[in-house]
Amino acid sequence: MLYVKAPAKINLTLDVLYKRPDNYHEVEMIMTTVDLADRIGLESRHDGQIKIVSTDNFVPDDHRNFAYQAAELLRNTYGIKEGVTISIEKQIPIAAGLAGGSSDAAATLRGLNELWNLNLSLDELAEYGAKIGSDVSFCVYGGTALATGRGEKIQEIAPPPPCWVILAKPKIGVSTADVYGGLKLDGIKHPNTKQMIQAIETNDYPLLCASLGNVLETVTFKLHPEVVTIKEQMQRFGADAVLMSGSGPTVFGLVESEPRVSRIYNGLRGFCEEVYVVRLLGERNPLA
Ligand code: ATP
């Protein structure tokens, strides 16, 4: 059995520039990985089938699973006869804005590259990733990057200054399509992506905190007011900066001082069941 880690991502910025003729939104976002990860196990099968086994009943066990699509894509493209059992130990909450499904697909691509001796580069794997979903390319590389296009064009940036990240996920799942569908581009407040890149590259933590921004917040806040409450609570308990990740509903807080982490964690646990304390990973994934 080959094991591959599939880390979650958070968005330090998420901007939507315009709607494209192909109906996708042109985005500009800075993403970084955190050390909350699913574990993907890959084991060859001689019957040529792709099977998904998961610890979580909400994870689809057929072609709807992004990890299944990753295996099918490589298998068909390279005429592989073998099948594979993909075991997914789920740690990343589902439909949370943390790219769990995309990261599982990316880890499957990296792992099968090894298991099936395909010798593909991360760039080639990221290109296959883009065929599965907009966030899969980023997840193939991990680390910290500016993603443009519909999210599949990746430019690596330096790891951000280290800090704690507190993730709080309200008990709702959010449909990314609904949130993008509800976005009105007129009069939205765009985050300052350039300033965020500068903050990361100069290791300027206060500037990083001041540069967080996500244009989807207002849409998700309207659909699910409990997300606003969590953001306000995290601010009140003393996080240095707070933002919703992706299309939500997970809200993350950045914290530099360790004693404050437990205060915020304990405060949030009072009314939110799913709270995680993690670190920024910052560095890129190795090839599996
Ligand atoms: P993003 O941040 O990329 O928008 P997300 O974190 O909001 O993603 P996911 O956890 O990837 O959302 O789940 C979105 C949907 O994808 C779920 O409703 C689920 O049915 C489907 N899905 C497909 N493959 C997986 C997988 N391996 N793990 C979890 N969900 C998956």
Image (spheres, rainbow, N blue to C red):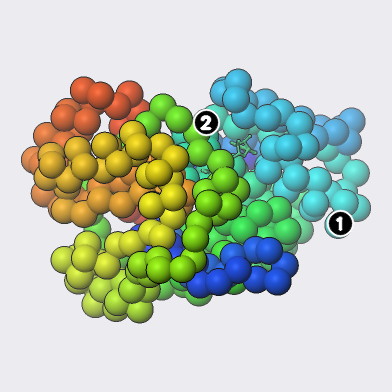
Secondary structure state at the residue bearing disc 1? loop
Q: What amino acid is labelled 2 in the image?
A: Lys
Residue 90 is marked as 2
- Seen from the viewer's position, the closer of residues 170 and 58 is 170
- Seen from the viewer's position, the closer of residues 183 and 10 is 183
User: Which quarter of the frame holds ligand 1?
Assistant: top right
Mark 2 Cβ and ligand 1 under 8 Å apart: yes
Rendered residue at 65%/71% (across/down): 20
Residue 121 is marked as none
Secondary structure state at the residue bearing disc 2? loop
Q: Position of residue 164 (x, y in %)?
A: 23, 48
**146 shown above or below 217:** below
Residue 78 is marked as 1
Neighbour tally class for label 2: few under 14, some 14-19, many 20 plus, Cα within 10 Å: many
- Seen from the viewer's position, the closer of residues 247 and 275 is 247
Whole-Å distance between the Cαs marked 1 and 2? 28 Å
Neighbour tally class for label 1: few under 14, some 14-19, many 20 plus, Cα within 10 Å: few
Q: Position of residue 183 (x, y in %)?
A: 50, 57
